[in-house]
Image (tube, rainbow, N blue to C red):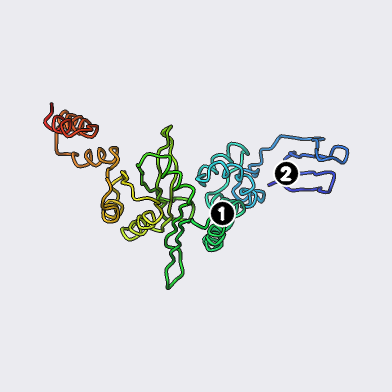
Amino acid sequence: MLVVSQNDSVRLTVRCNVDVYPWCLHVSVIRQGQEFEIKSMNNIHSCGCDIMSERHPGTSKKWVANTVKGKLLDKLTYRASEMMRDIRRDYSTFIPYHQAWWGKEVAVNSLYGDFRTSYHMLHWYSERALQSNPRLVLSLEVDPETQRFKCYFICFQASVYEFEVGFRPMLFLDGTHIKQHRVQGVILAVSALNGNNELFTVAYSIAYLKTYDNCVWFVQNLKRALLSDRRIAFLSDKGKGLKEAMPDIFLNDHHGYYFQHIMQNFKDQCVGKYAAPFKKLLRKILQRIAYTVTEQEYQDASNGA
């Protein structure tokens, strides 16, 4: 264990707490500035009670938080196990898992605030957004009994206007799970492709679960946000909720599905049913069918021509 034997505004001396071991370090400030220099150091330390101890007082959760803040800014999914590994590598310091976890808690709260407060501020944000964007389509749903968050939809008028006047009539719908910290839920997004085949977000929603009711609510808000009645080709992943909700609300539009998901579902259904060469042939036929553009090409591909 290390102990501080002298500590003031201009100098610091640290020694090993075991008298028979000579390890010590003495540093002092250079000319009353912000830098310091090592005046003396005996680096022989073999008592076994150095900073690698789990109970070292310097490795507090606050110290861990200050150490990992920079990496959390670059990678919000930085895990406690990764923090333990990096701190051990960079500082030759071992910290237990619970200390890394609490250090991350402190760092996240310091950087982004408490997640409960963030949800409470959605009311404030919605009011300000509507004041500055009068034609904004925005909807916030909460549980009427518990007042807990359920769904949030937002579509800026500028985004949907740009889609209507400058983009092909195709919209891509997809969702992803939120796996950050203690915040759970899903993000549903509607995107378009510009002239350079780059994704452009038209609208998005946050929901606590990807259920049929939430998907219907999301698609209804999207219907309300679109400015014109031109027919649109919608592409989605055949996920639960969207697959049923889209045709019910956009009755006269075209609906397609991502080939990647269709192929994966097809592979899953073929597991254990067919020999490998036959499954490979079926996948090739399915791929040819997926890329046909006329009815005749579809018939030819289906017949194996």
Circle 2 SS class: strand
Residue 262 relative to residue 168: left or right: left
Name, please, the residue furthest toward the top.
305
Specify which label sits upstream in the sequence, 1 or 2.
Answer: 2
Assign the C terminus to one quadrant of the image. top left
Q: Residue at x 32, y 45 (%)?
A: 232
Residue 179 x %, y %: 44, 50
Name, please, the residue furthest toward the right.
31
Which residue type carries mark 2? Cys
According to the image, label 2 marks what residue? Answer: 16
* Residue 152, above or below 200: below
Residue 264 found in image quarter: top left
Residue 206 relative to residue 250: left or right: right
Out of 68 and 179, give the one closest to the viewer: 179
Circle 1 SS class: helix
Q: Residue at x 32, y 61 (%)?
A: 213
Residue 252 relative to residue 45: left or right: left
Out of 126 and 103, give the one closest to the viewer: 126
Residue 131 x %, y %: 56, 59
How crowded is the residue under tag 2: few (<14 C-alpha within 10 Å), some, or many (20+)? many
Tally of numbered discs: 2
Which mark, residue 303? none
Q: CA distance from mark 1 to mark 2?
A: 32 Å
Which mark, residue 105? 1
Out of 139 and 2, give the one closest to the viewer: 139
Which residue type carries mark 1? Glu
Out of 168 and 275, give the one closest to the viewer: 168
